[in-house]
Image (cartoon, rainbow, N blue to C red):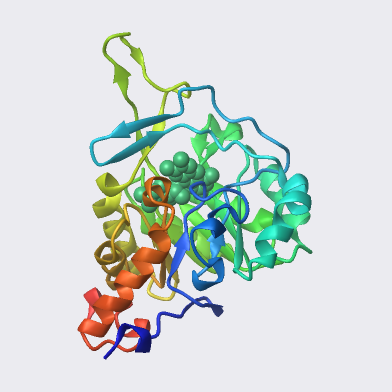
Amino acid sequence: MRASQVSISTEVAGLALPGVVMTASGTSGHSDELAAYGRLKDLGAVVVKSLSPEAWEGNPPPRLRPLEHGMLNSVGLQGPGISAWLRDDLPRLRASGALVVVSVWGKTVQDYEDAGKMLASADIDAIEINASCPNVEDHSRMFAHSATATSEVVSAVGDSHPRWVKLSPNIADVPAIARAAQHAGADAVTLINTVMGMAIDIEDRQVALGGRGGGVSGPEIHAVAVRAVYECRRENPELPIIGVGGVSRGDDALELLMAGASAVQVGTASLAEPRAPWRVQEEIRSWMAKHGVSHIQEIIGAAHE
Ligand SMILES: Cc1cc2nc3c(=O)[nH]c(=O)nc-3n(C[C@H](O)[C@H](O)[C@H](O)COP(=O)(O)O)c2cc1C
């Protein structure tokens, strides 16, 4: 079998995706920035950086710190706000022919409701609800660290578009939060956001990042993502999962698919190599051809059989 003969199209809760690899929110810009590196419509979808109803300036510098096998970031969700994004960024991204997934975040449940209303009639394919951010009404505990708050933000966004809910791995029982999201109307969950971390600059004897705490991403967190996906699939077999975390090679993506993800996202790897999402997709194809797997559906969840 040749790589060109295998099918890597997939679906997430009825939404057909032309490819199994998407971009991960926050690592490929707000629009068609990656179009210089490959055809966006060959990917599963483009997931844009999280947007809030109003513009937000993010955290003070420094915002990034390299780690031995990944990175620590405290970008702090900088963005232009949803209205400006709809006007300035969506048209170019739509024109690329890619599926468009808009990630939204907020500081309060009301922010999520406002975001949902602002996007209700937008020409987009899905909304990814980033629930891994601080809830100012709950002592800045992440929404996704509470089943109740997760349910509230899912309901608040409304059902104008398919809802994927991006969850935090910084909690013991990720499947329980996923279940709460599902009961509130989520069509799928995206697992995982970054792992909470911190670095100290030992010469300055100070916390290294301007935002103080940060999120660890890249190969260092891949095994955490595999476990979250596996356990969520085992506990909630009917809930579609998008796997993300430390995917830099086709083999990493295949692990997440076999653990139960219907599609995967590539984040940190794209920062060093913007063609990474396409390369990972081609490496999946090659693996499938070599192993006589003609359709991606044959391997999704295979590790549970
Ligand atoms: C610089 C940077 C910015 C990010 N911004 C967002 C964001 O705005 N919204 C979001 O849901 N996730 C964001 N993430 C998390 C990624 O989408 C992804 O869940 C995480 O990094 C794990 O995947 P990776 O190891 O492939 O990067 C960001 C990650 C990085 C490294």
Q: Is residue 140 above or below residue 283?
A: above
Q: Residue at point 34% right, 65% down?
A: 280
Q: Residue furthest top?
A: 204
Q: Quadrant of residue 285?
A: bottom left
Quarter of the C terminus within the rendering: bottom left
* Residue 84 placement (x, y as % from top left): 76, 45
Horizontal and vertical percent position of residue 234: 31, 70
x, y percent for residue 273: 38, 51
| Callout count | 0
Residue 101 spot, x, y in % from top left: 60, 61
Q: Residue furthest front?
A: 36
Res 227 quadrant in image:
bottom left
Judged left or right of residue 263, residue 186 is: right
Please state if 112 lies on the left or on the right of 217 as rendered. right
Residue 45 location, quadrant: bottom right
Q: Residue at x 58, y 62 (%)?
A: 184
Residue 62 visible in the snapshot: yes
Q: Quadrant of the N terminus?
A: bottom left
Closest to the observer, 285 or 170: 285
Query: Is residue 168 in sight in this rendering?
Result: no
Q: Nearer the viewer, residue 179 or 208?
A: 208
